[in-house]
């Protein structure tokens, strides 16, 4: 039962990744592209967590945590660059 749910989740998150990639490439605005990049990183984190559950390995959870931190920092830096034109004041 859990294996079937994990397989379905893999397919759905894969579809979400494809839709996010489409929005990242075809976004009408820069803010839409930043939002798509942030959502893409969140979906990648979900994919890593699912893979960690499937293989019963805790290493994937640590990688997901590091990716979450890097995604947050990247999103903040891009938004700050859009607002002020400079990241470091």
Image (cartoon, rainbow, N blue to C red):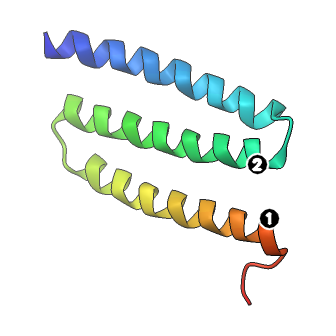
Residue at the spot 43% in from the left edge and 56% down from the top edge? 68
Along the line of sight, which residue is nearer the eye, 18 or 87? 87
Which residue is the site of mark 1?
A: 82
Q: CA distance from mark 1 to mark 2?
A: 8 Å
Quadrant location of the N terminus?
Answer: top left
Residue furthest front as drawn: 83
Q: Nearer the viewer, residue 83 or 48?
A: 83
Instruction: Locate residue 12: give its quadrant.
Output: top left
Query: Residue 30 location, x and y as percent?
Result: 82, 48
Indicate which disc, 1 or 2, sits on the residue closer to the N terminus: 2
Q: Is residue 15 left or right of residue 33?
A: left
Q: Residue at x 45, y 24 (%)?
A: 13
- Judge whether 81 appears above or below 13 on screen: below
Q: Residue at x 19, y 43 (%)?
A: 57
Q: Quadrant of residue 18?
A: top right
Report the residue marked by disc 2: 31
The answer to whether 16 is drawn above or below residue 47 in the figure is: above
* As drawn, 2 above or below 39: above
> In the rendered picture of this protein, how many numbered marks are placed on residues?
2
User: Residue 45 shows which numbered tag?
Assistant: none
């Amino acid at each position: 039962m859990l294996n079937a749910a994990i397989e379905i989740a893999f397919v759905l998150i894969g579809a979400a990744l494809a839709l996010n990639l489409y929005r990242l490439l075809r976004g009408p605005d820069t803010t839409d592209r930043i939002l798509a990049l942030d959502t893409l990183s969140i979906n990648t984190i979900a994919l890593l967590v699912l893979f960690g559950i499937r293989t019963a390995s805790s290493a994937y959870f640590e990688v997901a945590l590091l990716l979450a931190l890097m995604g947050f920092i990247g999103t903040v830096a891009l938004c700050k660059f859009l607002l002020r034109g400079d990241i470091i004041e």
